[in-house]
Amino acid sequence: MTERPVAIPPALLGALAAAALSTVALRAAPARAGLLGPVLQLMRPQLERRLSEICLDAAAGNQAALEEILRGPCRQVAGSASQCLIKEAESSGRSLGVMTEMLAGRLGDDIEVVIKRCAARLLGLPSDTLKDVPLQKLQKRFRIPSG
């Protein structure tokens, strides 16, 4: 069975980048990548909550009625995005770094790689497509507020 890319509006895709900019990253040896997957899964609810908050902020713009309508879709996007981030952290051998950065609340090289790989995957592109695009350019392109 082949995976189909998830259709995500630009504002919500940008929310993925913004969430990572404000929460995650680090370095892991590829041999350890699979061992840390369960630990990343334990951190997933925290990541999903943050992604959902950022999605609502970016898409609803403090409009209560719109926020209520978008709460469910933002939760769905957050679920897909968190799965993608964890899968890409593992497949790129950066699980330890991602986990460490998440706990420290900082952004580093590893999470940047993971974000770009995940964004490309969600757009249906090869995973390395966005590797040379600065994360700040993606954030600006999708009009995502900092932090």
Image (cartoon, helix red, strand yellow):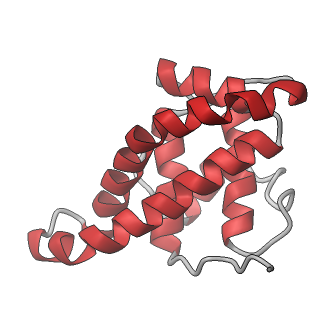
Q: Is residue 35 left or right of residue 65?
A: right
Tell me, yes or no, if residue 105 can be seen here.
yes
Give above or below for 101 relative to 57.
above
Tell me residue 10's x, y (percent).
52, 73
Q: Quadrant of residue 113?
A: top right
Q: Quadrant of the N terminus?
A: bottom right
Query: Residue 59 occupies which quadrant of the picture?
Result: bottom left
* Residue depicted at 79% across the width and 24% down the height: 28
How far across and down, in percent of the image, does residue 140 sit? 54, 57
In the rendered image, is residue 135 in sight?
no
Tell me which residue sits at (68%, 77%) in the image: 5
Q: Quadrant of residue 60?
A: bottom left
Residue 89 left/right relative to 49: right
Q: Can you give x and y, in whole percent of width and height, for residue 61 in the image? A: 24, 65
- Residue at point 73%, 48% (across, down): 88
Using residue 97 as the reference point, say whether residue 81 is left or right of it. left
